[in-house]
Image (cartoon, rainbow, N blue to C red):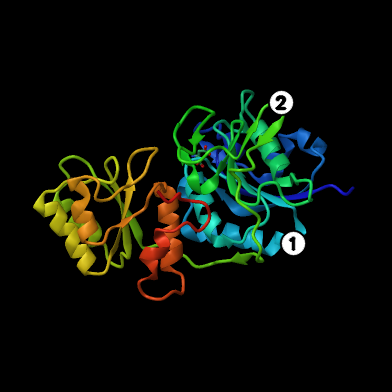
Amino acid sequence: MSQPSVLLIYTGGTIGMWADPRTGALRPMDLEHLEEQVPELERVGVKLSSVAFDTPIDSSDMRPADWVRIARIIGNNYHKHDGFVVLHGSDTMAYTASALSFLLENLAKPVILTGSQLPIGTIRTDAKENLITAIEIAAAKDEAGRAMVPEVAVYFEYRLLRGNRTVKVHAERFEAFRSPNWPALAEAGVHLRYDHGAILQHPTKPLVVHEQLEAQVGVVRLFPGISGEWVRHALSTPGLRAAILTSFGSGNGPTDNGFVAALREARERGIHLLNVTQCVGGRVEQGRYVTSRAFVEMGVIPCADMTVEATLAKAMFLLAADQPAGAFAQRMAAPIAGEMTLG
Ligand code: ASP
């Protein structure tokens, strides 16, 4: 049987960094040096090809245009490979994974994002296990010869998580990610154990790669004492099309007139407001408390159990989509790629 084939897409991040001897600061290395650090890659039984960003970047510098760039690379190479591994900084990995899940419609092959907390050249690095297992998952097939994981996922520290359900929860621990509202798709121990019930079904239609995103979306985190003035400034950003309000608990916010008036003015100017909870797990239920009633009245879109990362990417994706007026709110509140569970 011929070996499965996986394309490695190297975008940057700690995984491929080295310490600059002059300043001690971490800088990205090129793909060739990265591969040299993992001689085990020769023995994984997978035919590996690779492509890299011309200039690898820290993921804090990732922009929506870069998400499209990665989606395009996958689209252009889709039929040549069984799966894809995206090497990416962990800081904004959950945003990129979310965006790819919307940009790659009808994905039937694994797109596994991974990275590490310590550079690949360091002795205690978590990079080797992450990289090798991510490749194994990207190459894995079921008995019918179809991809085991036909979706965008994040592999980190022995767990495979749905990309658009993932949040980075720790800045230092190797176990940096969680998906609080969805079970792990697989756990890696002695065996790789897949949770088939948690993994998306295979699509019936061919892949469509979307290349448009509307980046004029913002996030306003609510906090006790937040003023109408603060909110008004944020929502007056020229060109703004939508803003995510990260709310308290099950979707609540202050009831004071100044705050509510600032939101209402934005709604009157046609800005979409999206309600996502600040809690790590659980969901928005607008109207459950008096403190979310104003949101219901002014047509704030409740985003159920979506993460901020997924909501941001989905809003950028849907605002750029060719759709009838009024469809945005409806589509935001319905699942597209397993990113939300309806209550
Ligand atoms: N700052 C790095 C990045 O996100 C951190 C990491 O890779 O873990 O690119």
Query: Residue 340, how many percent across, how many down?
Result: 45, 50
Q: Residue at x 9, y 53 (%)?
A: 257
Picture quadrant where residue 43 is located? top right
Query: Residue 132, how many percent across, how many down?
Result: 70, 36
Q: Residue furthest right?
A: 1
Circle 2 crowding by C-alpha within 10 Å: few under 14, some 14–19, many from 20? few
Q: Is residue 261 above or below residue 44?
A: below
Q: Is residue 158 above or below residue 198?
A: above
Q: Amino acid at mark 1?
A: His
Disc on the earlier residue, 2 or 1: 1
Query: Residue 292, how many percent across, how many down?
Result: 22, 49
Q: Tag on residue 190?
A: 2
Circle 1 crowding by C-alpha within 10 Å: few under 14, some 14–19, many from 20? few
Q: Which residue is mark 1?
A: 79
Q: Amino acid at mark 2?
A: Val
Query: Residue 24, how many percent across, how many down?
Result: 51, 31
